[in-house]
Structures are given as structure tokens and as C-alpha cells.
Image (cartoon, rainbow, N blue to C red):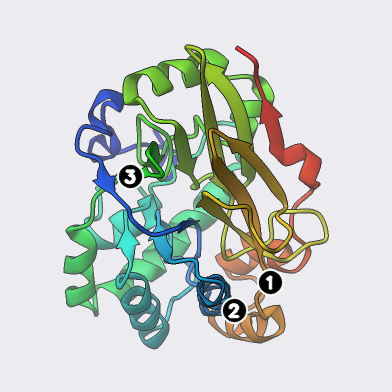
């Protein structure tokens, strides 16, 4: 298996094991933040969003479910991003795992499926090599990352919220990717909900957003994948997305949202200052660099999706 397409053994886990020791959360709102990708202006905006909620009397818990590192390939930005994120509730993504505990032959650890172009895979491996060189200069942060779990199971509003990076079988799994919902993965989803007992599964990793609602064993369930907090997710839209989970509806307009059993799950836009981030990105990753080739167009123009493309449902 080519580097960047393989999945290290340490990434695998059993779905039955994920929610054996859930953690109760007492805040009013969860922000689940995947794929920040080292974007400090996106983090600034997310913190401002949380402050706006708190001014309305909502206590907010920030939950980072991985890949908060990626473009932050300088000593100062690497330290800043990690120190800010690690003040909150955090679990690892494949990027963060490979910075703390590099796996032989894993490359970026993305476990890219066959439909992803080989050029993307190779560029991601080169980004990882550069970022690993930066991380090696910060052993204290590497150690803090190495102690983080690969997933979290939270009790929120009396319901079970499973927070993973990839899917319920692997840190870098693609089973909750947008492409998986387009092709149909109902049987697999049902098995995962039964095995974990989760009411909501929140994911990221695969870079495109999803909001799925359905029923498994006569019980309402939801899947949400925020795509990326630090890059555009929709057509002609450079805003990031985060997942908001709360017992109240959001006060600003979500890209997509659903309510089941009193729980409001929303994909909220992160309208950060692209005009400030882009010059810094260009300095770190000039034209022709692997990150510029793979990601700069998306930073400016978003993806090909429109909001209706994000929403899926099943009555099974």
C-alpha cells in the first residue's frame, strides 16, 4: 500500500469499545471543530462565536476532533495553534497523531481511498514531512499530543454523542465521508449505531460536510461531518464550518441543521478574515508548493457543493 493510502494498525479500534466510558458534559452548547488545519484566523472567529453565545447565557464547550495542524509550518504558528487548542477538550486526527507518534510507511496517515488522485496523496505526504520537521523542534507539544485519545464519547442533554475523527472503525476511516453517503452506506451506519449506542456521531477528516438524519431500531440518530473549520466547504464560499450541538436552535443562520429528540445539530459557518490568512498562507506555502497546489484554490473559492448537497436522510 502506498504511503498516504495505508492505515496504520494503531488507527484501528472496535466500534463496541468507543462509548464504554462516556464523559458527561454540563455546558449548554458543544462546538465540534474538525479540520482547523492550522488556520489562526478561523480559530479567532470560532472563539468570537463562542463569546457571542456566552453573552446570551449559553455556556460553550469547544471540542477539537483532530487535524488542527496542517498549514501551520512555522515554529511560532505551530506553538500558537497547539497551545490554544490544547486548552480545550481535544482528540487526535491523523495529522496530529503523525506529528506526535510517526508511523513507518504511513505518510500523511490520511488513508486516502482510490477515488482520490495520486497527486493529492503525494502532496499530502510532502506537507506532512515538512510539518513533522517543525514538530520535532517542539518535543513538549509532541508529548502533549501523544497523550490525547483518538475519540471521545460525551453525554450531552441525556443523549450519547460520539466524537470521532474518521469513522467508528478507524482514526482515518472514510465511512462517514460525503462520498460514502452519496454511494449509500445505510447498512454500515446501522451497524455502527448499534455497536456504539450513539445518538449522534460527529466526524471530520474527509473534508466535505454531511448532515444525515435517520432511524436505527426505531430510534432517531444523526451523523454530522463538519468538513473543514479552516477552509471553504461550499461553492464560491470560503467560510469554514463547525458543528454546533445544543438544546437550543442557533441564533445565526446555519448552512444546514436538524432537530431530533430535543437536540439541535447545525453546521455553522466560520466567517474568518480570509484577507488576513491568505498572505500568511502564501508566505508559508508559496505558489508551486504542495499545500498551494492542493488547497489554495479551495481557500479562496470553496468546493463544488451547495447546501442542499450536504443533507441526507433515511427512514430505515
**Residue at x-position 40% and y-position 63%:** 61
Residue beneath disc 1? 271
Residue 281, numbered circle: 2
Q: Identify the element where label 1 is drawn.
A: loop
Identify the image quadrant of residue 213.
Answer: top right
Query: Could you tell me if the residues under marks 3 and 2 are in contact, i.e. CB atoms within 8 Å?
Result: no
Q: Identify the element where label 2 is drawn.
A: helix
Query: Could you tell me if the residues under marks 1 and 2 are in contact, i.e. CB atoms within 8 Å?
Result: no
Give the alpha-carbon distance from disc 1 to disc 2, as whole Å.
17 Å
Provide residue 200's location: percent of width, then percent of height: 47, 35
Q: Identify the element where label 3 is drawn.
A: strand
Q: Nearer the viewer, mark 3 or mark 2?
A: 3
Provide residue 235's location: percent of width, then percent of height: 81, 54
- Sort mark 1 into few (<14), some (14-19) or many (20+) by Cα contacts within 10 Å: some
Provide residue 37's location: percent of width, then percent of height: 50, 65
As drawn, 275 above or below 242: below
Q: Depth check: 175 or 99 in front?
A: 175
Residue 311, numbered circle: none
Residue beneath disc 3? 154
Amino acid at each position: 500500500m502506498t504511503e498516504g493510502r495505508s492505515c496504520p494498525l494503531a488507527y484501528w479500534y472496535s466500534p463496541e469499545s468507543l462509548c464504554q466510558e462516556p464523559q458527561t458534559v454540563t455546558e449548554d452548547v458543544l462546538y465540534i471543530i474538525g479540520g482547523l488545519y492550522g488556520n489562526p484566523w478561523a480559530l479567532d472567529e470560532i472563539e468570537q462565536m463562542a463569546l457571542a453565545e456566552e453573552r446570551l447565557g449559553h455556556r460553550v464547550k469547544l471540542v477539537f476532533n483532530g487535524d488542527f495542524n496542517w498549514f501551520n509550518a512555522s515554529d511560532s504558528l505551530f506553538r500558537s495553534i497547539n497551545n490554544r487548542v490544547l486548552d480545550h477538550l481535544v482528540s487526535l486526527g491523523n495529522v496530529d497523531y503523525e506529528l506526535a507518534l510517526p508511523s513507518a510507511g504511513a505518510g500523511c496517515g490520511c488513508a486516502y481511498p482510490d477515488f482520490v488522485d495520486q497527486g493529492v496523496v503525494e502532496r499530502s505526504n510532502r506537507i506532512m514531512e515538512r510539518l513533522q520537521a517543525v514538530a520535532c523542534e517542539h518535543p513538549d507539544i509532541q508529548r502533549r499530543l501523544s497523550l490525547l485519545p483518538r475519540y471521545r464519547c460525551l453525554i450531552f442533554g441525556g443523549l450519547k454523542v460520539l466524537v470521532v475523527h474518521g469513522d467508528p472503525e478507524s482514526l482515518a476511516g472514510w465511512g462517514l465521508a460525503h462520498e460514502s453517503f452519496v454511494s449509500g452506506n445505510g447498512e454500515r451506519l446501522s451497524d455502527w449505531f448499534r455497536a456504539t449506542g450513539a445518538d449522534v456521531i460527529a466526524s471530520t477528516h474527509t473534508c466535505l460536510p454531511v448532515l444525515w438524519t435517520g432511524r436505527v431500531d426505531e430510534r432517531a440518530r444523526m451523523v454530522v461531518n463538519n468538513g473543514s473549520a479552516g477552509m471553504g466547504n461550499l461553492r464560491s464560499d470560503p467560510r469554514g464550518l463547525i458543528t454546533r450541538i445544543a438544546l437550543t436552535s442557533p441564533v445565526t443562520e446555519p448552512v444546514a441543521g436538524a432537530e431530533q429528540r430535543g437536540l439541535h445539530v447545525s453546521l455553522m459557518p466560520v466567517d474568518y478574515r480570509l484577507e488576513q490568512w491568505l498572505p500568511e498562507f502564501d508566505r508559508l506555502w508559496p505558489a508551486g508548493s504542495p499545500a498551494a497546489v492542493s488547497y489554495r484554490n479551495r481557500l479562496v473559492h470553496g468546493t463544488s457543493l451547495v447546501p442542499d448537497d450536504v443533507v441526507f436522510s433515511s427512514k430505515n
